[in-house]
Amino acid sequence: MEKKMTSGEIAKKAGVSQKAIRLYDEKGLLRPAGYSEGNYRLYDEESLSMLNKIVALKKIGFSLEDIRDSLSNGKAEDIRSALELQLRAMEEKRYSINMVIDTIERTLSRKGVFDNRKHRRSCCVSHENIPQ
């Protein structure tokens, strides 16, 4: 017989809170495998596998609704397609961030830019110069 886990145990294994487990249940993402005599939710290894998928998709930016839709279809190609879209969006963000970093580095490397000590002091106020 497979050992069942409480919501606290499965939450700890997946690195999420018990509140997240309840939310995922309310949203129809993660259903308990059963209930204890005290009517506590119980989960199995299949539940843990599903929870790990939910957590992974959430970490890369999927909304709970998108996750539910992808997982409820049960089609690997739907999840793959959604992941490919997310990957493209992340690559675009990375490109934009790299462009800003390059601009800042070029600006800072120009000779004479920000060499004026007076300017440096005025932009970086120390606590000893603040009037009491």
Image (cartoon, rainbow, N blue to C red):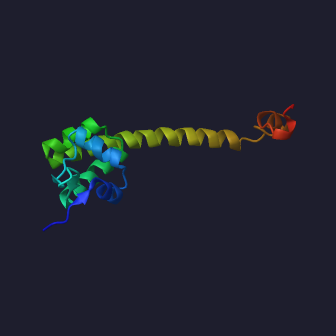
Residue situated in front as seen by the camera: 8 or 73: 8
Vertical placement of residue 52 versus 117, above or below: below
Describe residue 98's horizontal placement relative to residue 82 as left or right: right
Vertical placement of residue 129 versus 75, above or below: above
Location of residue 124 by image quarter: top right
Residue situated in front as seen by the camera: 36 or 72: 36
Residue 84 seen in render: no
Q: Residue at x 84, y 33 (%)?
A: 130
Residue 106 seen in render: yes
In the displayed orientation, state which residue is furthest to the top: 131
What x and y, as percent, mark residue 65?
A: 25, 35
Location of residue 101 by image quarter: top right
What x and y, as percent, mark residue 94?
A: 45, 43
Describe residue 4's horizontal placement relative to residue 121 as left or right: left
Q: For the N terminus, which image quadrant?
A: bottom left
In the displayed orientation, state which residue is furthest to the bottom: 1
Q: For the C terminus, which image quadrant?
A: top right
